[in-house]
Image: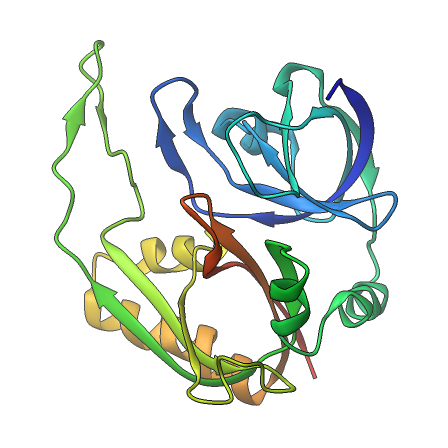
Amino acid sequence: MGWEKETITVLVEAAPTWSKKYGYLICTAGLNEKGEWRRLYPMPLDIVLSKIRRWDLIEVETTKPEHDARKESRKINPDLIIHRGKSLIDREEKRSFLNNLSEKSLDSAQTEKRTLTMIKPEVLDFYIEERKEERIQLTLNGKPFRKQPYGDIGLFYRWKCPVPCKGCIKRPHMMECFDWGANQLWKRYEANPEEAKEKVTRKLFFDMRDRFDTWFALGTHSRYPFLRWMIIGLFWFKK
């Protein structure tokens, strides 16, 4: 497959992870001009920090990667990204966009072997799992870094599809959330773990359940492309 130009509305920026080849990468995904999901790789952290935000419209050259079975995945040249401004600005336009994009359950995505989707969930519960902190490593310049800078905490949702799928008709989904903003919220208060738990739970659970219209962007793991689903993006607007 050769290279082709695509214009992408950026919807997902997941928490950074480390790549030996590229450094810190951001799992970035969105919709192209045809309404097709795209997972873009590699998207280095410094490029995202400098010029790419959710709802931005970017032009990229894409090609199908050799070692990723997920059909929405595309390799890009990160040095050739062109920023085309904002795709949507108005809140109600964004709300309408998300509603039109949302699916009733995971069944259709799984049947069609798709690995990205959007769902407006019934949020049932929320858990915070504190993990053993990763040992700090040093770069060749002596600077400290962690391969998984957000790996010492796990944010988990228990939820159901609006129309129960084959999975949640038996028992609710339990999925970890890798949304970058959600993980940054924890980092903001992590010096005081009790305060962090209280503020993060209030924002990411009680407000989402009771005060906000909420959507989950879902994606699958590259090692288990049609089995393991994760929450890779959170969206919410006041009801």
Q: Is residue 238 left or right of residue 151?
A: right
Residue 113: horizontal and vertical position, in percent? 63, 56
Count of numbered labels shown in the rendering = 0
Residue 57: horizontal and vertical position, in percent? 79, 39
The part of the image, by quadrant, that contains residue 103 is bottom right
Residue situated in front as seen by the camera: 215 or 21: 21
Looking at the figure, which quarter contains the C terminus?
Answer: bottom right
Q: Residue at x 40, y 44 (%)?
A: 223
Residue 68: horizontal and vertical position, in percent? 53, 35
The part of the image, by quadrant, that contains residue 43 is top right
**Residue 56 drawn above or below residue 175:** above
The part of the image, by quadrant, that contains residue 51 is top right
Q: Residue at x 63, y 44 (%)?
A: 29
Q: Residue at x 45, y 89 (%)?
A: 170
Residue situated in front as seen by the camera: 76 or 13: 76
Q: Residue at x 16, y 42 (%)?
A: 134
